[in-house]
Image: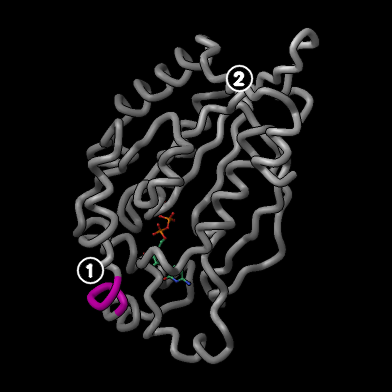
């Protein structure tokens, strides 16, 4: 945390170096993870951490997990947004946090992983541009715009191979929750994006431009936030 805080000894003011926060949203199976991996690979010389909104899915009670096909994972209420906000706010002031991992096969949170602060934080997930308080943490907002037929084709393959589902279950979840959730929550959040990437991870030009912009912003050193004293940081963030 010391790397991120610099106190002015004459007036007690604390400058808090703010990491550059990038939000990456888009429909399910749109290629968000691949886009993030490509950005991270091109930012070789920077410390980057990737936070996935999936980590903040609420674990279902034993009773509800029996009715899994009736659960809506594409609604904002499926996520513990308060926990996500608290983790992101701590990372922003250079504090390490424990972030849960989530198992898509059992629909449960597993043990938490320690995530260290970094110069760049990428927050990825279907609904990261939906909630205003989460958007407010971001310096750059990206929407990965991939054709819905392509997303469905990828989803069928992925959910069967990686998430232990069958075709019938994938298609019925898609019709009942995924498509309506995309139309009601995800697509309307596209208007908040600074950059929309058509064709997702196939669009190397867009990814090159994004990485150039991140380099420019990082070199401008304009990401510091000033607090009157250290106690204000502690009380704001309940450290
Ligand atoms: N989901 C699910 N079962 C759960 C939790 C989530 O089927 N227990 C589904 C939700 O229906 C949601 C999707 O997971 O539509 C969100 O994951 P997605 O964004 O598709 O995963 P990524 O791998 O991040 O996608 P991308 O291909 O864009 O990288």
- Spatial separation of the CA atoms under disc 2 and disc 1: 41 Å
Q: Is mark 2 on a helix, strand or loop?
A: loop
Image height check: is 127 above or below 67?
A: above
Up-down: is 148 above or below 63? above
Magenta: main secondary structure: helix
Give how far across and how far down residue 32 sits, in percent.
Answer: 39, 46
Q: Quadrant of residue 1?
A: top right
Pick the front one: 239 or 30: 239
Residue 5 or residue 41, whichever sits in front: 5
Locate residue 158, reporting x and y percent. 40, 64
* Residue at 51% from the left image edge and 14% from the top image edge: 222
Residue 185: give x, y in percent of width and height: 28, 58
Residue at horizontal 44 percent and vertical 69 percent from the top:
78
Look at the picture and state if 99 lies above or below 80: above
Span shown in magenta: 173-177
User: Residue 110's spot in the image, x, y percent?
Assistant: 67, 67
Q: Which of these two is toward me, 89 or 26?
A: 89
Describe the colour scheme in one phrase. Answer: one colour
Q: Which quadrant of the rendered structure holds the C terminus?
A: top right
Any magenta on residue 175?
A: yes
Report the residue marked by disc 2: 45
- Considering the numbered disc 1 on the image, is that residue within a helix, a strand or a loop? helix
In reply to whether residue 114 is colored magenta, the answer given is no
Q: Check residue 180 in the rendering and tell me which mark sits there, or answer none.
A: 1
């Amino acid at each position: 945390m010391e790397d991120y805080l610099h106190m002015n000894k004459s007036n007690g003011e604390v400058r808090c170096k703010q990491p550059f926060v990038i939000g990456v949203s888009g429909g399910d199976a749109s290629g968000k993870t691949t886009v993030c991996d490509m950005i991270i690979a091109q930012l070789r010389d920077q410390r980057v951490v990737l936070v996935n909104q999936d980590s903040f899915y609420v674990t279902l009670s034993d009773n509800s997990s029996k009715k899994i096909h009736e659960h809506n994972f594409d609604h904002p209420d499926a996520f513990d947004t308060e926990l996500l906000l608290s983790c992101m706010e701590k990372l922003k002031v250079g504090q390490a946090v424990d972030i849960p991992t989530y198992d898509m096969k059992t629909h449960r949170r597993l043990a938490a992983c320690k995530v260290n602060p970094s110069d760049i934080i990428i927050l990825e997930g279907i609904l990261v541009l939906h909630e205003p308080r989460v958007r407010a943490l971001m310096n750059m907002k990206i929407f990965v715009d991939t054709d819905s037929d392509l997303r469905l084709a990828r989803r069928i393959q992925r959910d069967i191979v990686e998430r232990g589902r069958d075709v019938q279950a994938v298609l019925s979840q898609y019709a009942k929750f995924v498509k309506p959730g995309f139309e009601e929550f995800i697509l309307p959040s596209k208007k908040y994006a600074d950059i929309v990437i058509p064709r997702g991870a196939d669009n190397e030009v867009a990814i090159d431009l994004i990485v150039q912009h991140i380099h420019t912003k990082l070199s401008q050193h304009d990401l510091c936030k000033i607090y009157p004293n250290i106690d204000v940081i502690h009380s704001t963030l309940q450290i």
